[in-house]
Amino acid sequence: MLLYVLRRIGYMIIALVAVSFVTFLLMRAAPGSFLEMGSGGVVGVDLGLGSVGVHDPQAVQEFIHVFHLDKPWYEQYWGYLWGFFTLHMGTSFEYPATPTLQLIGQTFPLTIMIAILAIALAVVLSIILGTLAALRANSWADRGTVLVASLAASIPHYVVAVFLMLIFGVWFHLLPVVGQAGPKYFILPVVAMALPMCGSMSRYMRNSLVETMNSEYMVTVYAKGGGLRAALFGHGMRNSLLPFITVVGPQLASLMMGTVYIEQMFGILGLGKVFTSASSTRDYPLIMDSTMIYAVLIMVMNSLVDICYGALDPRIRKAQAKGR
Amino acid sequence: MTPLLQIKDLSIQFRTDEATVNAINGVNLTVPAGGAVAIVGESGSGKSTVMMAAPRLLPGNAVVHGEIWFDGRDLMTLNEKQMRSLRGREIGVIFQNPTAYLNPTKTIGQQIVEPLLYHHIASAKRAKEEAIDLLDQVGIGDPRGRFDMYPFEFSGGMLQRVMIAMALIASPKLLIADEPTTALDVTVQAEILMLLKKLQRERGMALVFVTHDLAVAAQLCDEVYVMYGGMVMEHLPVPQLVRASKHPYLRGLIQSIPPLDGPVEPLPYIPGNPISTTRPLPAGCIFAERCAAKMSVCEKRPPLIDFDQQHQVACWLAEKGGIA
Ligand SMILES: Nc1ncnc2c1ncn2[C@@H]1O[C@H](COP(=O)(O)OP(=O)(O)OP(=O)(O)O)[C@@H](O)[C@H]1O
Ligand SMILES: [Mg+2]
């Protein structure tokens, strides 16, 4: 078991190095620099480094020196990587007064909360819808959900978000659409993220359950005197959750990317917002750190999915216990 | 002996998208209480279909006509709830392939106790003790430890013992065994057969043993029904099987059993293919096209002719004393 965990962590570190390296390359390849595109690019605006503007060569020199931009690329890269792993990330270009760690600490909980609520809502909804569709397999209700599901799956988060804002915010004034002043504010963002996921996930749940309910060991359950309830809750659900969970995993990456759009649209100051503004101002340290945080998040969530899978499947659980 | 199970004029069609399968075409069959009856026939002759019709475990596309009297009730007229209270408690079933007919994600213990729990016969704790006791009786060593193991940790032969324990735990009056040893190797097969015989005697339980192996049927049972194309060709007591069998089909089957002693010679076999169940049945004898003793009278379908008490034959030859 320990070996398994260690190996898993090893893979994660390798993946993280790869992600950060690609990010670094792309970031350096992107045209423009913070000095032109960040808040300092507008002449005369306070950069936060004292009054530094692009027109002040001395201040620019100092800026370049402070952030090690005069060092060779590999030293810079290593600096970002080492800083991230040791949690000494320093500060970003844009917010030199706030350590990046603190910035992430403030925004990260919002994002992770939205993501977890969205995935939980999507999973619960998909299981309920998928089960109902499976029990009425091939009825008109089942076929109806196919249509809705394929619609939902082909509409992106942000379009769903606009519709929800329009219906619940603008027409019926039921829920706030922008801001983060209380729990109410998070309902629409979470729903907007969850709904598109439900489409494919509920179909998958349905197919998986139909297959389970038609398998041979279900005949045994009926032969023992079990009814539909025993078959469904005693045997079917758990077994169809196994394949279902494997499709939740791949959704996570797109879910995390979804937070970026959603935070932008609903005006929520989360990690996604930090990430987008860092990218558009070419705030190198912040791009690196927020990307790596995202990567770690996705990897941790994927591991959680694997752990759930193992807990449900005795074959994997026993194999892990033996420490394969 | 009063019959425990009496099947009258049973006919079963399977409706599929391509065709209607005439699986059973008028079968009469009687199982005395405490007796052991074998149903023998080639693959596709409808053995499983007949016997799965009794506990009404056929898939939804089966159309069943006829009467199935069990212990004074016509099962065809019972509702689903009444039927459920019979399954697993008065009628136990074991299947050909124990690996497929056991849920891979639940321990065998959980699965064995289910008949007792479904029928509220015992508390969970009592049920566990009974299961452990029964596992011991069917020859599983260390039943207490094995109770919490999963099907993948057992061999095929052990799983079939588990299936037997599961079918017997609620002490049914009738056990239906559908080719329980076909998936096992020969030595294990013999052990399971002996176990079944022993349990059947001890418990005074009726047994219907479905098999394609005439020799096995003769070892285990008191009487044999020989099926072909969804009909009974001959019914006779086992002691008369070799000397008094009348139907050319049964004769063919007997001759194709390899002798244990004597020189190795090519065995005679029945030429031709089993009758197609998807086409309309011929007007005459359904075995005629493969029959070496075909006569002109075979253009007309022979009824089951009473040859003797306990001995019926569906062949015109029976009137003349049977095939030479
Ligand atoms: N669910 C089904 N749908 C359609 N046809 C079926 C179904 N089940 C069985 N049949 C058909 O009914 C006929 C009898 O099948 P059955 O399974 O009873 O044969 P069997 O004698 O048990 O054969 P085997 O030795 O292979 O188990 C076959 O022609 C088979 O193809
Ligand atoms: Mg069969």
Image (cartoon, coloured by chain):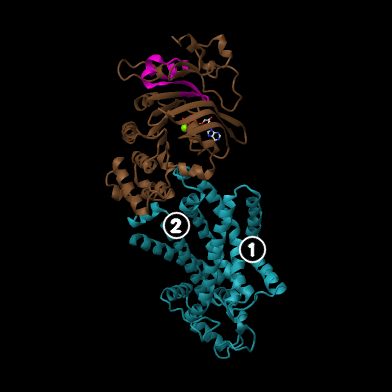
Residue B178 lies, with reference to residue B314, above or below; the image says below
Label 2 secondary element: helix
Queried on whether the Cβ of the residue with tag 1 lies below 8 angstroms from ligand 1, the answer reads no
Residue B118 lies, with reference to residue A104, above or below; the image says above
Seen at 46% across and 18% down, the residue is: B312
Seen at 38% across and 17% down, the residue is: B240
Amino acid type, label 1 = Pro
Mark 1 falls within which chain?
A: A
Q: Is residue B315 toward the left or the right of residue A147 in the image? A: left
Q: Which mark is residue A156?
A: 1
- Rendered hue of chain A is cyan
- Rendered hue of chain B is brown
Q: Which residue is mark 2?
A: A309
- Number of residue marks: 2
The region drawn magenta spans B226-253
- Residue A2 position in % (x across, y down): 33, 62
Q: Is residue B186 toward the left or the right of residue A273 in the image? A: left
Are the residues flagged by discs 2 and 1 from a single subunit? yes
Amino acid type, label 2 = Tyr
Residue A279 lies, with reference to residue A216, above or below; the image says below
Q: Earlier in the sequence, mark 2 or mark 1?
A: 1
Within the image, what quadrant is residue B199 found in? top left
- Residue A84 position in % (x across, y down): 45, 74
As drawn, the residue found furthest toward the bottom would be: A50
Tell me if I can see residue A30 in this picture: no
In magenta stretch: residue B197: no
- Residue A275 position in % (x across, y down): 56, 74
Where, quadrant-wise, is the C terminus of chain A in this rendering?
bottom left
